[in-house]
Image (tube, coloured by chain):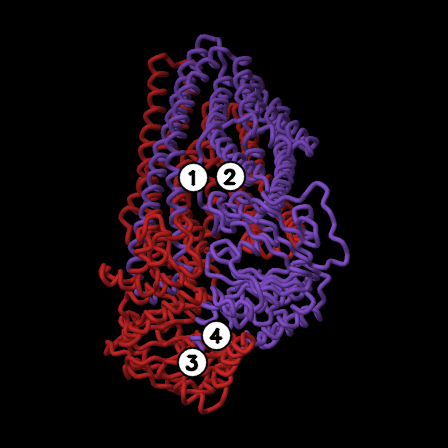
Chain colours: A purple, B red
Amino acid sequence: MAHGFDDDTILGKAYDGRLVRRLAGYVTPYWGRLSIAVILLIGAILTDLLPPLLVQRAIDGPISAGAVDGIWPYFVAFLGTLLANFLFRYSHSYFINSVGQQVMKDLRVAIFRHIQHMSLSFFNRNPVGRLITRITNDVDALNEFLTQGVVMIVADLLTLIGIIVVMFALNWRLALISIATLPALSLIVAIYQRFMRAAYRLVRQRLARINAFLSEQISGILVTQLFNSEDRSRVTFARLSDDYMQANIRSVLIFAIFIPSVNLLAAIGTAALLWGGGNGVLAGWASLGMLAAFIQYLERAFQPIRNLAERYTVLQSAMASAERIFAVLDTEAEVRDPEQPRRLPTPVRGEIELQNVVFGYNPAEPVLRGISLRIPAGQSVAIVGATGAGKSSLVGLLARFYDVQAGSITLDGIDIRELSQAELRRHIAAVPQDPVCFSGTIASNIRLHNAAISDEQVRAAAELVGAHRFIEQLPGGYNHEVRERGANLSIGQRQLLAFARAIAFNPEVLLILDEATSSVDTETEALIQEALARLMRNRTSIIIAHRLSTIRHVDRIIVLHKGRVVEDGSHDELLARRGYYYRLYQLQFAEVN
Amino acid sequence: MSHLRLLVPYLQRYRRRLLLGLLVAALGAAISALGPLVLRIAVDEIAAGTIDLARLFWFGGALIGLALIDGTMKFAQRMLIAVTSYRIENDLRADLFDRLLSLDQAFYQQNYTGDLMARMTNDLSAARQFLGPGLNGAATALLTFISATVLMVFVDWFLALIVVLLLPMATIVFIAIGSRMRQIFHRVQDQFGVLSTRAQENFSGIRTIKAFAQEEDEIAVFTADNERYRDLNLRYVLLSGALWPAMTLCLGLIAALILLVGGRMVAAGELTIGELVQFNAYLALLAFPMIMLGWMVNLYQQATASLQRINEIFLRQPAIASPTVPQQPARQGAVEFRNVGARANTTDHRWILQDVSFHLPAGKTLAIVGATGAGKTTLVNLLGRVRDPDVGQVLIDGVDARELDLAALRRMIGYVPQESFLFSIPLRENIGFGVATIDPDRLNHVIEVSRLVNDLDQFPGGLETMVGERGVTLSGGQKQRVAIARALMRDPQILILDDALSSVDTHTAAQILSGLRAEMAHRTTIIIAQRIATVRDADQIIVLDEGRIVEQGSHQDLLARNGRYAAMYRRELLAAELEREESD
């Protein structure tokens, strides 16, 4: 997967009661299926213990006694055990995974829903890649936790205990010899895990670096090529790739030492059993069948110990993922709907009033420093000012992407914080600064998910903004496929689509245009200007534009400077005042002549 | 299948290590097959009661000794074969990246970034797994199987037959379930892609989603995608959950048969108890390698699919490359287009440019105006050979651009693209991108001209500030100014500005333009712009409409012509006059 490589380092504890209790909340709805899975698992563990015992009984019984046909019952029992074991294991896997998949789906949707309702400031703080990681990798880690973690740890422990109990029941002396190797195995496994975790972490970090570099290189390949920087890229990439290989070779080395060590330990255990068992047979306190059974049990006792160490890593990474997921879920939206939202009086008139509005992305550095304005219903207003004057912030506040720090904004006399955001935004269409496109078709980019907007309305909106001409020329017209982020459309085309979208939603009250016309050529812009003039009629409209020619149709112009309203009036009034607006106008006029 | 051939030169590069690795693997396999033999002799002697403590000790020592030798061999085998597989992966990755660096825009438009990255990581990893654990496991499995079979046949051919014939059953079941699993897994992966793309698009476009109150609809779509993903996963689990239990079942079945047949033979006195234990030990020894063999087949299938995807990149020849006998450019900067035509792409044959001809002497300025989609960017892309024309010729200093040394041609050009792309490297390196040594005076000069100097105090580390996710995020206008500085830093003969001031406010734009005039005086310059004010001083102006030059000449010529350009001019003038009239 091409995203989310950051901060996936696994550190910290493997068990955190607080996190596990919260996770349990997502599992409890499926407790029925989960308990079936556990019962099936116990069945599987018990049937696992039987085969060596059957071998022992067969060898010490009919085989030693020379009873040729006496072996049949053991064979049949063996087969029955095998079949039962298969069924237990298979159905366990199905039940536990069905719980896991269900919980994952619930969690993903819960996180997505929560993120959907976050304020824009949240998205400014969190890069998209990080959020994707929460929904994908972190949720997967929790699935591992459920299916491979908790349940299997219990299973491994039960298996180990079961084997030890059976061994002691069979022969305590041989049992003591057998379990003597287990502490050594635990030690080897623990040391191995320690080295391997560090090695894997290095591998992951270095792979993440390769991925980040590659992604940027592919996106910026044209710049690299046109600026003759291929060699620089080659050298950097070779270094990253080499680092990655070295980290991998390190993990190979650790593994190459580990596996033979475990095998050697198994051989030592077998040799000890042979020596002790041989002694026992000669002395009469053991049988050949026991020797054969113990050799098999020893092998089986190794597996759970090796598993347990791996499960520890699963737990650790699950705890880290849970921590990160809950951190997202615990982030409260800064912009929230009130408990009992008020409704706008119908019909909505569109009168807006700002009283002493103060706002800053960073509270210590206000962008808007006390703005009071009254915009009567139906008035069209242009906001002008230099970059950083606070124009975009003002629009963000009106759409309630952010909340004011002090003061208030009212729509038809109701504070917009007392409305639900959905209600507010049904009456406001905003064309954002970056024209955003989604993968889908041209038509789906105009109507989004709103099925109420008919094909005719989509087309009418496109015609109104002058997008129809280029759309018709595309293969498939309105059904032309738009690629991720509108990569197959020009910026101008994307902007026209964004306009068409705003118009298709037919905002009853307010149209906000946020410097959106800056990349469209004169001719296209002339088309848009016409469309705008039609749209602004009978609507409260607020326009932000770089160029003064785009705002000549408005009733009123507000000049913002360093977060304050410095001029407010009609075009003529402001020119007569010979202030800030006048200078902006002069600059524009000087350019034309 | 044939895609495996891709690996041959790489395998040859490391053939000594690989052959040595196979030799060590063979030795290891032969040694490990001896263990059960020792066990048999010991058990038989215990059963016969002829053994004493010293001999028991000796047998135990032999088992440990064999394990030591076997362990050493396995260690050497991994260090030789597995490490080599990582080296080959590394070599392949470097070669792939080399190819990516030389491929043209047409290629990048046909392939998604994520897909290319998957080829550079996941597909390479699949190829490496086939070479490393795959070959390693296959070698161990086959060699152990052969040596164990020989030793078993010596003991009892009938019992040996049961093991030899039935053990591959585990391999076959593994392959059968494994390949079905892979088919479904692909669909699971595809759905995962749908899921993460959906989230990615949603989060990137959250402003739009919120502005149109689409949150609930988005959640509904995301939930439906998730349910599909869950269902596919459950179908996958139905298969994957069967895999290991089925292996246990197969191996258990053989063990049960050995117990029955072997046990009857022991009871009848045709086989010793030690030999029965020996057979059981072989079964344990062979179980894992035989499963590995099945896994190997899956790895092989995955590797061929992955190698095909990797090979697609290797087989793709760069459409834009230096000719075999390149000419060096005269580095004056004269540009000429002769009847140039360019189609949309190989599948879409519409003309983006048609019959475009003009001559721009070195040092002169050409301005291009025209509607969105008129072909302006395509036109300037032909200069640096971002793409080549389908008909006609682009000549630089009188030589067809396709006959010039590509690197030298591009070194002549300073390009400011419509969308400024910066790298996650310090600001200074972004400005000096592609310049061998950064001259501090030139650096200061271009920062001045691009008006980047206005923003420097906003960056915490000044010019050393990191750009991008790990550093500061630049505004659209700041990015454009860095892009302008970057293009000027090369001191190019040809300067291309593709709507380069669109995100800069009027005041700053005027400042940049006045600074640029001095830079443009001694360079060939091509400006794409939307405003007459920006283009009127150009020596030549071209009006493009649907890929054709509809008007061409100086500002005065075009006004006199009273065509489209004049109309544009009048429209702007009118706008200004309207504002003036209104103010009167």
Which badge, 2 or 1, comes first in the chain's sequence? 1
**What is the number of the mark on residue B145?**
1
Q: Are marks 2 and 3 in contact (CB under 8 Å)?
A: no
The answer to whether marks 3 and 1 sit on the same chain is yes
* Picture layout, residue B291 above or below residue B297: above
Chain assignment, label 4: B
Residue type at tag 4: Asn
Which residue is denoted by mark 3 in the rendering?
Answer: B390
The subunit letter for the residue under badge 3 reads: B
Q: Which residue is mark 2?
A: B167
CA gap between label 3 and label 1 equals 61 Å
| A243, B67: nearer the viewer | A243
Quarter occupied by the C terminus of chain B: bottom right
Q: Nearer the viewer, residue A353 or B52?
A: A353
- Residue A258: percent from left, percent from top: 37, 31
Please indicate, yes or no, whether residue A476 appears anywhere in the rendered image.
no
Q: Which numbered mark, 4 or 2, is in the foreground of this view?
A: 4
Residue receiving disc 4: B345
Q: Say whether disc 2 or disc 3 marks the residue closer to the N-terminus.
A: 2
Q: Position of residue A355 (x, y in %)?
A: 61, 50
- What kind of residue is marked 1? Phe
Residue found at x 44% / y 44%: A6
Distance from Cα at disc 4 to Cα at disc 3: 10 Å
Which chain hosts label 2? B
What SS does tag 1 mark? helix
Left of B223 or right of it: where is B556? left
